[in-house]
């Protein structure tokens, strides 16, 4: 909204206005060449101006040809309104989905059929696939010994923790053992038996 100026023989000024409470604002003198803030045009650098003035079409192309070229572009088999406003990635994903639909569920059926054919029944009645072995089961003997060594190290660590806990209890550092600490102390015998068994096997 432009500021209402009043001019007289003394110069240009903003007229006195009334406030909502009924009092009056004084008239304000305006110097020559002053432009109020709301009337100052917004600064635009040369690049912004260039892109605003730049035509949408390439030089020499008529609007009719441009409309025809836009209609020819698009993904075959997909309606134009579906792809309108989608990014390149979204369009690529739509193509992939269509490709999967064309391949159909036959590929999944074949893989399941092969898995069922290769399945064997174990003695306990559980089905075991030859392809899926337990994570710990390996044919390599060196990895088996490494696994045993790792297990033994872990058990020894637990036994050390139990011994430290027992010493703290005996010295009176821990007056009342918590439930977890009591369970740890109770497992000491089982851990020793397991360690002995592993040592005998190796």
Image (cartoon, rainbow, N blue to C red):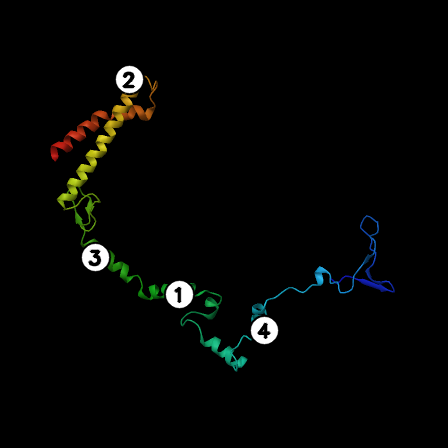
98 lies above or below 175: below
Tell me where residue 109 appears, x and y as whole percent: 26, 59
Q: Earlier in the sequence, mark 1 or mark 2?
A: 1
Q: Earlier in the sequence, mark 3 or mark 1?
A: 1
Question: Looking at this view, is 149 or 112 the one in front?
Answer: 149
Disc ID at residue 114 = 3
Answer yes or no: do the residues labelled 2 and 4 have beta carbons within 8 Å? no
Q: Quadrant of the C terminus?
A: top left
Q: Residues within 10 Å of mark 4 (few under 14, many from 20)?
A: few
Q: Label 2 to label 3, Cα distance in Å?
A: 63 Å
Q: Quadrant of the N terminus?
A: bottom right
Q: Which residue extends farthest right?
A: 9
Q: Quadrant of residue 124?
A: top left
Residue under numbered circle 1? 92
Q: Residues within 10 Å of mark 2 (few under 14, many from 20)?
A: few
Disc ID at residue 170 = 2
Q: Secondary structure at mark 3?
A: helix
Tell me where residue 13 appears, x and y as whole percent: 82, 60
Answer yes or no: do the residues labelled 3 and 1 have beta carbons within 8 Å? no
Q: Earlier in the sequence, mark 1 or mark 4?
A: 4
Name the residue at 24% across, 58% down. Answer: 111
Residue under numbered circle 4? 53
Q: Label 2 to label 4, Cα distance in Å?
A: 89 Å
30 lies above or below 53: above
Q: Earlier in the sequence, mark 2 or mark 4?
A: 4
Observer-side mark, 1 or 4, equals: 4
124 lies above or below 113: above
Q: Earlier in the sequence, mark 2 or mark 3?
A: 3
Q: Label 3 to label 1, Cα distance in Å?
A: 32 Å
């Amino acid at each position: 909204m432009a500021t209402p100026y009043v001019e007289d023989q003394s110069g240009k000024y903003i007229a006195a206005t009334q406030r909502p409470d009924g009092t009056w604002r004084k008239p304000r003198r305006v110097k020559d060449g002053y432009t109020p803030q709301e009337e100052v045009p917004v600064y635009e650098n040369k690049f912004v101006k260039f892109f605003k003035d730049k035509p949408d079409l390439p030089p020499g192309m008529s609007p009719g040809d441009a409309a025809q070229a836009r209609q020819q572009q698009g993904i075959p088999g997909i309606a134009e309104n579906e792809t309108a406003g989608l990014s390149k990635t979204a369009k690529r994903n739509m193509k992939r989905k269509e490709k999967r639909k064309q391949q159909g569920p036959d590929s999944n059926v074949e893989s399941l059929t092969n898995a069922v054919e290769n399945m064997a029944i174990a003695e306990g009645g559980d089905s075991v696939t030859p392809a899926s072995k337990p994570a710990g089961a390996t044919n390599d003997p060196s990895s088996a010994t490494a696994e045993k060594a790792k297990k033994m190290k872990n058990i020894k660590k637990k036994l050390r923790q139990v011994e430290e806990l027992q010493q703290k209890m005996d010295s009176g550092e821990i007056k009342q053992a918590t439930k977890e600490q009591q369970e740890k102390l109770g497992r000491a015998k089982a851990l020793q038996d397991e360690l002995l068994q592993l040592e005998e096997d190796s």
